[in-house]
Image: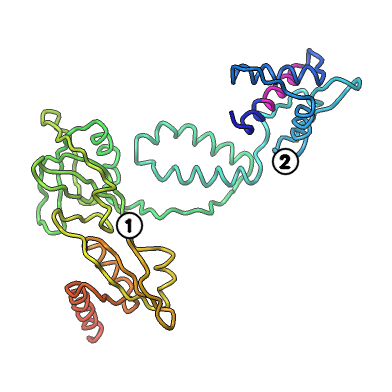
């Protein structure tokens, strides 16, 4: 058992003893009680010394642990709480405690779209009430990027339940390319979030490739309990290890990519790598760098590159360089024309 846990057991034991106002507690009594408590937890003799018990009382009295326990000595040998209602289990929250709890509650509430949130919602409500009672008008300092108006979020829990219970779903889905929604069965494997957007990953049929469907394009979800679920040993980390985002084309090979990053963007790319395969190949004069990546080129990666505009130049492969070049040329033409 760790020393920290031993100490916590001793503090709680001393606290429990001193709450009993009907008995007089000497230092030796507290030592014996702590020794017995540790024996119950560890199953072996572990005598607590006089020096240890004195230090425990001193720490409990101090502000170091946040207890400020009103332990007093009377008749020169007995210990008690001056405040008979005091206990270390009911100490007020510190300002730091309040701030930490406020941010924790705020972050947990981001998952309110899942039913698993219901299991802790009552606890969070009590925490919020406690925080408000201790310090009203506490302003959060952590904000997670989440679009509450994003369509499809109400399907999160239905799909989550289907995945963990391995149930086939019937989806009514309208892609950006379709004029009318389509209905089909789907075997859901995981839910994946990328760039503040949720996707359902799975298969339409066991023999077909894995695909991702945007939740904001789903119009309806139903269950098909009669259709057998396509059991598959799907590993999300392996499946997405060579891509950025959610688009994965089966059979596509990993490409060796080289990018030049200008001086302004180099620190950003160094401190926030595009991908785990990223390596710095060169530090060029003026502060620019050349990086290499090994991944499958997809829509999300190309969009990421385009987002840096003139700050990134594709050095290799040539096919990607030409594709990005054409996109920049088309974009430039838009700005060569007067605003409509």
Residue 181 is marked as none
Residue 64 is marked as 2
Cβ–Cβ under 8 Å for marks 1 and 2: no
In-front residue for pair 226/50: 50
Residue 270 drawn at (x, y percent)? 42, 67
Residue 195 is marked as 1
In-front residue for pair 332/289: 289
Magenta stretch containing residue 309, yes or no? no
Work out whether 144 lies above or below 154: below
Q: Earlier in the sequence, mark 1 or mark 2?
A: 2
Residue 318 drawn at (x, y percent)? 19, 75
Residue at 11% from the left image edge and 50% from the top image edge: 181
Disc 1, SS = loop
Residue 20 drawn at (x, y percent)? 74, 16
Work out whether 108 lies above or below 311: above
Residues shaded magenta: 10-20
Seen in the image, is 120 located left or right of residue 294? right
In the displayed image of the protein, which residue is found farthest to the right? 75
Q: Quadrant of residue 2?
A: top right
How many residues crowd mark 2 within 10 Å: few (<14), some (14–19), many (20+)?
few
**Which image quarter holds the C terminus?**
bottom left
Disc 2, SS = loop
Residue at 69% from the left image edge and 19% from the top image edge: 35
Residue 148 drawn at (x, y percent)? 36, 51
Q: Magenta region, mostly helix, strand or loop?
A: helix
Count every numbered label the image shows and give the total: 2
């Amino acid at each position: 058992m760790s020393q920290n846990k031993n100490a916590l057991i001793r503090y709680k034991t001393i606290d429990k003893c001193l709450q009993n106002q009907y008995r007089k507690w000497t230092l030796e009594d507290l030592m014996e009680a702590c020794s017995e408590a540790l024996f119950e937890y560890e199953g072996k003799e572990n005598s607590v010394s006089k020096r240890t018990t004195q230090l425990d009382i001193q720490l409990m009295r101090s502000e170091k642990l946040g207890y400020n326990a009103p332990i007093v000595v009377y008749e020169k040998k007995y210990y008690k709480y001056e405040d008979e209602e005091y206990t270390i289990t009911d100490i007020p929250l510190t300002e730091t405690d309040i701030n930490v709890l406020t941010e924790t509650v705020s972050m947990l509430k981001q998952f309110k779209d899942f039913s698993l949130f219901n299991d802790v919602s009552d606890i969070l409500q009590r925490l919020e009430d406690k925080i408000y009672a201790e310090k009203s008008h506490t302003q959060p300092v952590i904000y997670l990027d989440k679009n509450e108006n994003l369509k499809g979020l109400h399907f999160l829990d239905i799909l989550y339940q289907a995945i963990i219970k391995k149930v086939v779903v019937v989806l009514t889905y309208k892609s950006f390319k379709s004029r009318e929604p389509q209905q089909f069965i789907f075997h859901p494997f995981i839910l994946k979030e990328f760039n503040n957007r949720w996707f359902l990953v799975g298969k339409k049929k066991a023999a077909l490739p894995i695909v991702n469907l945007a939740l904001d394009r789903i119009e309806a979800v139903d269950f098909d309990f009669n259709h057998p679920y396509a059991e598959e040993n799907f590993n999300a980390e392996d499946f997405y290890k060579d891509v950025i985002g959610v688009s994965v084309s089966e059979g596509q090979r990993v490409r060796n990519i080289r990018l030049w990053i200008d001086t302004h963007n180099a620190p950003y790319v160094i401190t926030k790598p595009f991908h785990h395969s990223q390596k710095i190949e060169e530090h060029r004069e003026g502060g620019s760098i050349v990086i290499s990546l090994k991944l499958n080129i997809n829509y999300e990666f190309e969009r990421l590159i385009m987002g840096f505009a003139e700050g990134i130049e594709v050095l290799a492969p040539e096919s990607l360089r030409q594709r990005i070049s054409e996109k920049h040329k088309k974009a430039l033409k838009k700005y060569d024309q007067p605003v409509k």
